[in-house]
Amino acid sequence: MSVATKEMIVGQELPALRKVVTLEHMRLYTLWSVRNTHTDWEWAKKSGVPAPICQGLMIHAYVSEMCTKFFGENWFKGGKLDVRFASYTLPGDVIEIKGVVREKIAAGDAFRFNCDIWVENQAGEKTLIGSASALVA
């Protein structure tokens, strides 16, 4: 079930999604058989990062989860996502995936909702910024 309806207005917030990032989840996502900057403390430090860093695709999946909850099946029928990573996500971080409707454009019998999206860590720092859009009939 989606949240988005044609009646929604610019400024509407997308339902936020909260995740606790753990090393165990990072290792599962990476298939722990591989030692790299995403799974191993020593390897990460040798690579010049403070700790194992969460894979970008894992964060991307969380963003897509929020968009799926908001747009429903419309997300799978032409949803668009454009993101840039601003900082690392580390084990123990508590992140919130957020968004707001920036623009509503008529498209035939539907509307295209263009949204600003971002991910914040527990310190309020944005670790990902971008945009998402989908048609809502």
Image (tube, rainbow, N blue to C red):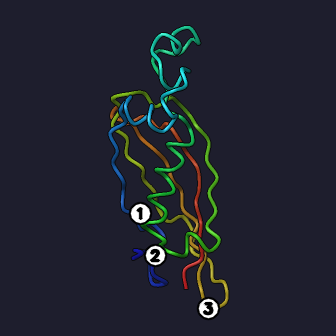
Q: Tell me the residue at 39%/76% (across/down).
A: 1
Look at label 2 and name its amino acid: Ile
* Direction front: furthest residue: 33
Q: Position of residue 58 (x, y in %)?
A: 51, 42
Between discs 1 and 2, the one toward the N terminus: 2
- Compared to 40, does 72 lie above or below? below
Q: State which mark lies toward you, 1 or 2.
A: 1
Q: Secondary structure at mark 1?
A: loop
Q: CA distance from mark 1 to mark 2?
A: 11 Å
Q: Is residue 115 left or right of residue 123?
A: right
Q: Which mark is residue 14?
A: 1
Q: Position of residue 32 (x, y in %)?
A: 48, 29
Q: Position of residue 116 (x, y in %)?
A: 53, 56
Q: Residues within 10 Å of mark 2 (few under 14, many from 20)?
A: some
Between discs 1 and 3, the one toward the N terminus: 1
Q: Tell me the residue at 59%/86% (across/down).
A: 110
Q: Is residue 27 left or right of residue 113?
A: left
Quadrant for the C terminus, please: bottom right
Q: Which residue is mark 3?
A: 109
Q: Which mark is residue 29?
A: none
- Compared to 135, does 81 lie above or below? above
Look at label 1 and name its amino acid: Leu
Q: Tell me the residue at 37%/41% (across/down).
A: 95
Q: Quadrant of residue 2?
A: bottom left
Q: Which residue is mark 2?
A: 9
Q: CA distance from mark 1 to mark 3?
A: 22 Å
